[in-house]
């Protein structure tokens, strides 16, 4: 019998640009927090489409919202016209955050492009045409488009694509002196992840984010929090910044916001929004009724106090159980809520690959950190299964 998965993999290898290395199985369906491949193998999912599938697989209300939109016959109308879910989602985001206004887009990188443009426009409107710099930090990840790439200081990502957007200035993450040296009169904006994701699950210290707030105020610069990975309940509060006593001027969202459909959002204060005029920015697809209708369900569910309390409880349990694993390969356990990482003495991809054999999906964050960003509906029993599998995998890797 010809192998169904192999046929699909052969097509991918022959026709898809090889910008990703994919494992040798083909996913077909999901239920709860588990994905299944064409051979019926089950995978407990600690990736969630890279911190995207907050409600897991087959959430009835999310499915109903998407089906409800489809039943109207309208999938898209563009930003030339009003639609209800677009306005309603923006209202919900403002009510549940520091923000006064929202601009929608289609991805995380696009949200950060929007944030960079907004920061520059704020300065431009004040007549400060040389106030164009965007300060970013070591180990940051803000995306792969030319602007967002310029503030993603990783040589492997940047070097082949030079010249990048001018005006990006690098400082050291969690180093207040370094931030002080980088932020000045020419700074239009400062972009930072309160909890760095791709860079290795590194939490910002409260002192650092508070210092950035003060420096931005001092130099009339816009403070941008990239909560694309750490926002929408991931760290146990709806927004990661809530745990820091600091509010930004702009916050970017994407990954989990529409439960798996592509969306991005730039949330901002009125002071920022008032610098933006019709024609300054736009997108054909952004904020469409299918995705914003889905996002309303995600935001409503995730923002319930009981939902967030469960993320904190299961997240604490995850951290505890990870810290209990006794392996010479583990250097450190880090994270908050259901965003955790273990720093290893070996390449994390070794364990990602081993996970496939054990029915476990994990993903690396940088070279040496194994990352856990599961659906936010994970339960303690799933954490127990993870720890069992991981303990065996680490033993096997240590003996290899
Ligand atoms: C994933 C990510 C991005 C980029 O999002 P895309 O949707 O892949 O463009 C930006 N910032 C952070 C913190 C991310 O985790």
Image: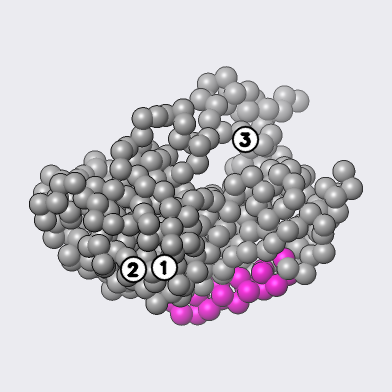
The overriding secondary structure of the stretch rendered in magenta is helix
Mark drawn on residue 213? 2
Position of 148 relative to 176 (above/below): above
Residue 50, horizontal then vertical, whole percent: 53, 51
- Residue 100 sits in quarter: bottom left
Q: Residues within 10 Å of mark 2 (few under 14, many from 20)?
A: many
Up-down: is 343 above or below 76?
A: below
Tell me where the magenta segment starts and ends, as one range.
Answer: 304-322
For label 1, the SS is helix
Q: Mark 1: few, some, or many residues within 10 Å (few <14, many ≥20)? A: many
Q: Is residue 384 left or right of residue 299?
A: right
Instruction: Give whichever of 125, 220 is nearer the camera.
Output: 220
**Residue mark closest to the camera, 3 vs 1:** 1
For label 1, the residue is: 209
Q: Is residue 198 visible?
A: yes
- Check disc 3 and report the residue beneath it: 22
Q: Tell me the mark number nearer the camera, choosing from 3 and 2.
A: 2
* Residue in the picture at 10% in, 52% down: 127
């Amino acid at each position: 019998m010809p192998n169904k998965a192999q046929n699909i993999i052969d097509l991918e290898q022959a026709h898809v640009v090889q910008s990703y290395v994919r494992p040798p199985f083909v996913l077909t369906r999901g239920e709860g927090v588990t994905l299944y491949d064409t051979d019926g193998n089950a995978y407990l999912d600690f990736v969630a489409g890279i911190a995207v599938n907050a409600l897991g697989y087959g959430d009835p209300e999310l499915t109903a919202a998407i089906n409800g939109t489809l039943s109207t016959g309208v999938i898209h109308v563009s930003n030339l016209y009003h639609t209800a879910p677009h306005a309603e989602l923006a209202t919900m985001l403002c009510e549940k955050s520091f923000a006064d206004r929202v601009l929608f887009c289609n991805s995380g990188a696009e949200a950060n492009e929007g944030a960079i443009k907004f920061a520059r426009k704020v300065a431009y409107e004040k007549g400060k045409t040389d106030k164009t710099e965007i300060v970013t930090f070591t180990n940051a990840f803000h995306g792969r488009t030319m602007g967002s790439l310029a503030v993603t200081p990783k040589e492997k990502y940047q070097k082949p694509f030079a010249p990048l957007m001018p005006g990006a200035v690098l400082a050291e993450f969690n180093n207040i002196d370094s931030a002080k040296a980088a932020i000045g009169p020419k700074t239009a904006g400062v972009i930072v992840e309160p909890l760095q994701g791709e860079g290795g699950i590194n939490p910002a210290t409260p002192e650092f984010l508070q210092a950035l707030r003060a420096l931005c105020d001092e130099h009339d610069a816009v403070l941008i929090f990239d909560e694309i990975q750490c926002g929408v309940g991931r760290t146990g509060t709806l927004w990661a910044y809530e745990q820091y006593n600091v509010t930004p001027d702009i916050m970017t969202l994407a990954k989990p916001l529409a439960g798996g459909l592509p969306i991005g959002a730039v949330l901002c204060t009125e002071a920022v929004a008032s610098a933006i005029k019709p024609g300054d920015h736009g997108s054909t697809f952004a904020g469409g009724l299918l995705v914003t209708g889905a996002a309303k369900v995600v935001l409503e569910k995730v923002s319930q106090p009981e939902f967030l309390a469960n993320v904190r409880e299961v997240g604490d349990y995850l951290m505890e159980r990870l810290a209990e694993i006794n392996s010479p390969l583990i250097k450190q356990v880090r994270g908050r809520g259901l965003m955790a990482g273990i720093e290893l003495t070996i390449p994390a991809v070794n364990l990602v690959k081993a996970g496939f054999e054990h029915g476990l999906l994990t993903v690396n964050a940088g070279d040496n950190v194994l990352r856990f960003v599961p659906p936010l509906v994970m339960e303690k029993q799933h954490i127990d299964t993870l720890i069992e599998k991981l303990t065996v995998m680490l033993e096997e890797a240590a003996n290899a």
